[in-house]
Image (tube, rainbow, N blue to C red):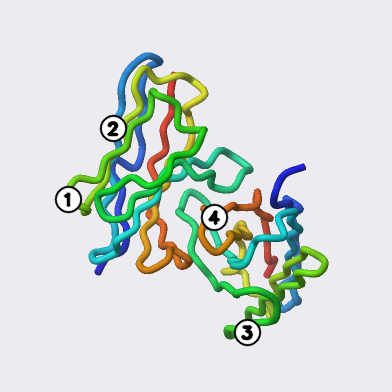
Amino acid sequence: DTGVSQNPRHKITKRGQNVTFRCDPISEHNRLYWYRQTLGQGPEFLTYFQNEAQLEKSRLLSDRFSAERPKGSFSTLEIQRTEQGDSAMYLCASSSGQGIEQYFGPGTRLTVT
Amino acid sequence: QKEVEQDPGPLSVPEGAIVSLNCTYSNSAFQYFMWYRQYSRKGPELLMYTYSSGNKEDGRFTAQVDKSSKYISLFIRDSQPSDSATYLCAMRTSYDKVIFGPGTSLSVIP
């Protein structure tokens, strides 16, 4: 087991473009979380899945953001019509059980120019 | 007022010192209290968590929770240069999402 992986690690895009990130959780973890982290701040919750069901979404997740977890395995986070304010580190975490022990991936750093 | 407050530092200590990191919170419903370590440009790594009040020890790390004061602490004994990182406290209720503090940047000087 190699832990949570995320791709790409870095993404530079122009404002208005769409981007998609992928997260592969630890195998057999039923819960998967997406967070956003900006400089000098802790991770902020965006959304989470239990298996393939998306159970909660933060108000931070505007209608330009969409996340999927088909078949309860990997997950994708898409941002449409990117804005400069979307520049951040996007972190994925997975857990089993009730989600107390969350294991984070290395993150995808997004820069919107 | 933010739900979780944490002094951002930076905190600089000599190797071998005892480090004390602290967070305060406002939501009395928080039941689980976690400490994460995050190295530069890496994802957070869970160090330990406690449920409700009390102490928990794991090697050089000790976590304390005082729910009456809404105050949690992480102590690092015999600090090492490899402990240099940002330390994030995090907490949640029994069923809700995890709320992170902003993190404290720690440097341990050899």
Is there CB contact under 8 Å for labels 3 and 2? no
User: What residue is rendered at 72% in x and 44% in y?
Assistant: B2
Circle 3: residue type:
Glu
Residue under label 2:
A20
**Which residue appears at 36% of the width and 58% of the height?**
A94
Q: CA distance from mark 3 to mark 1?
A: 39 Å
Which structural element holds mark 3? strand
**Disc 3 from disc 2: Cα separation:** 41 Å
- The one nearer the camera, B17 or A111, is A111
Residues at discs 3 and 2 both on one chain: no
Please, is residue A86 above or below residue B103 in the view? above
Point out the frontmost of discs 4 and 2: 4
The local secondary structure at tag 4 comes to loop
Residue B10 seen in the figure: no
**Residue A17 left/right relative to B58:** left
Which chain does tag 3 point to?
A: B
Can residue B85 be seen here?
yes
Disc 1 target residue: A71
For the C terminus of chain A, the image quarter is: top left
Marks 4 and 1: CB-CB under 8 Å? no
Classed neighbour count for the residue bearing mark 1: other residues with Cα under 10 Å, few (<14), some (14–19), many (≥20)? few
**Disc 1: host chain:** A
